[in-house]
Amino acid sequence: MELFGLAMEQLYMYTLIIAGALTVLYVFFGDIADGGEALPFLNPTVILAFFTLAAAAGYLLEIGTGLDSLAILAIALVAAVLLDFLLYFFVLLPLSSAESSIAYTEESLLGQVARVIIPIPENGYGEVVMETYGGMIAKRATGYDNEAIGQDEQVLIIDIKDNTLYVRAYKPISFVEKNQ
């Protein structure tokens, strides 16, 4: 069978090459083309995966079986829908929820203890680093009362304004019993 003047094997191969190339481009430039939280079946990843899977299944069935081209097209489309469904629900959805779970808000930093890595001068700015479940976070900091704080000192985050942490020197409370 021919479609658009091409044998079905050629049509499947051209579709596979074009869909594969678009997938590679989407991997590199996907953030620019991201439309946000649209309908799942309008997600470019799902659409490109559908065309790639359908073309690959169609090509393999055309060269490997003696079935009719319409039957092969139907089988390839059904296989692509099933595999695309599995890709979406078992790969893409877990990845999207995992990505948002490592994010932090500035309010979640309040009350945390950090370590000064660039000394904070009086009436100036330095830098602190804190360890969270998502990794190490380095942020600009200044003294809450405009005091100077030296390098490697521990500080307590009191307030956050304009992406700047307002900190005070932190001295942990020690409950040591005196046995005398």
Image (cartoon, rainbow, N blue to C red):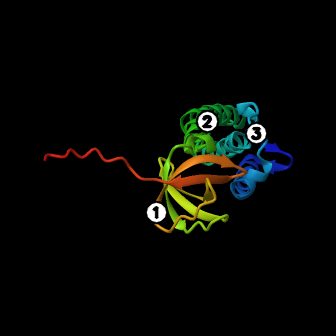
Res. 22 in view? no
Question: Residue 57's image quarter?
Answer: top right
Rendered residue at 64%/33% (across/down): 75
Give the alpha-carbon distance from disc 2 to disc 1, as whole Å: 47 Å
Q: How crowded is mark 2: few (under 14 residues within 10 Å), some or many (20 or more)?
A: some
**Mark 1: secondary structure:** loop
Q: Which mark is residue 153?
A: 1
Q: Name the residue under label 2.
A: 88
Q: Mark 3 points at which residue?
A: 36
Amino acid type at circle 1 is Glu
Res. 44 in view? yes
Q: Which of the image's four quarters has the N terminus?
A: top right
The front one of 76 and 103 is 103
| Mark in the foreground, 3 or 1 | 1
**Mark 2: secondary structure:** helix
Amino acid type at circle 3 is Gly
Is residue 33 found left or right of 154 in the rendered image?
right
- Image marks 3 and 1: residues in contact by CB distance under 8 Å: no
Rendered residue at 70%/32% (across/down): 40
Amino acid type at circle 2 is Tyr
Q: Position of residue 28 (x, y in %)?
A: 71, 59
Give the alpha-carbon distance from disc 3 to disc 1, as whole Å: 42 Å
Give the alpha-carbon distance from disc 2 to disc 3, as whole Å: 16 Å
The front one of 56 and 33 is 33
